[in-house]
């Protein structure tokens, strides 16, 4: 079953909900999760969201803003997120870039996690992603 594509404005709420579930079941220190950012070349003939939905697990959450994507990967540490991202970029013939933030290392809530992710985007890609950054921040 494919992953779900969520509206970009829901990213902070979903992150906070996921953290609340981890806290509720006392898994906060045992179950990391990752946020992965990547941008794909604009090709109107390719429905990247549909392709990604079929690649990702049904528990993964995909957020799209035009050609920019963020994936929330439950129960996935930095190493797992790096492997997944490399596989996606190779499959789609995209240049390798990684911008990954992990919970709890890079932040204890949605705001700090997103801030950390966007700082990493600026470091690795050299630009700001304003549309996703301003949503819910």
Image (cartoon, grey):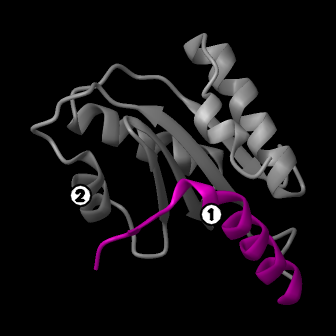
Which residue appears at 37% of the width and 69% of the height?
Answer: 3
Give the x, y percent position of residue 107.
87, 48
Q: Is residue 4 above or below residue 62?
A: below
Residue 70: give its label: none
Q: Secondary structure at mark 1?
A: helix
Observer able to see residue 77: yes
Left or right, 9 with respect to 28, comes to left
Which residue appears at 48% of the width and 75% of the height?
Answer: 59
Q: Residue furthest top?
A: 126
Which residue appears at 44% of the width and 48% of the height?
Answer: 64
Residue at the disc numbered 1: 10
- In whole angstroms, how far apart are the C-alphas of marks 2 and 1? 19 Å
Tally of numbered tags: 2
Q: Which residues are magenta?
A: 1-25
Give the x, y percent position of residue 41.
28, 25
Residue 50: give its label: 2
Q: Is residue 69 above or below residue 63?
A: above
Mark 1 burial class by Cα count in 10 Å: few <14, some 14-19, many 20+: few
- Is residue 58 covered in magenta? no
Can you tell which of label 2 and label 1 is closer to the viewer? 1
Give the x, y percent position of residue 52.
30, 54
- The residue lying toward the viewer, choosing from 3 and 66, is 66
Give the x, y percent position of residue 25.
83, 89
Q: Residue furthest bottom?
A: 25
């Amino acid at each position: 079953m494919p992953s779900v594509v969520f509206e970009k404005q829901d990213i902070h709420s979903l992150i906070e909900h996921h953290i609340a579930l981890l806290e509720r079941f006392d898994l906060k220190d045992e179950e990391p999760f990752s946020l992965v950012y990547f941008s794909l070349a604009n090709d109107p003939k390719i429905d990247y969201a549909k392709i990604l939905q079929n690649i990702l697990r049904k528990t993964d959450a995909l957020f799209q803003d035009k050609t920019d994507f963020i994936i929330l990967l439950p129960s996935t540490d930095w190493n797992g997120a790096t492997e997944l991202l490399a596989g996606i970029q190779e499959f789609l013939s995209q240049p390798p870039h990684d911008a990954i933030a992990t919970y709890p290392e890079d932040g204890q809530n949605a705001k700090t996690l997103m801030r950390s992710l966007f700082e990493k985007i600026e470091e690795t890609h050299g630009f700001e992603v304003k549309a996703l950054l301003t949503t819910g921040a």
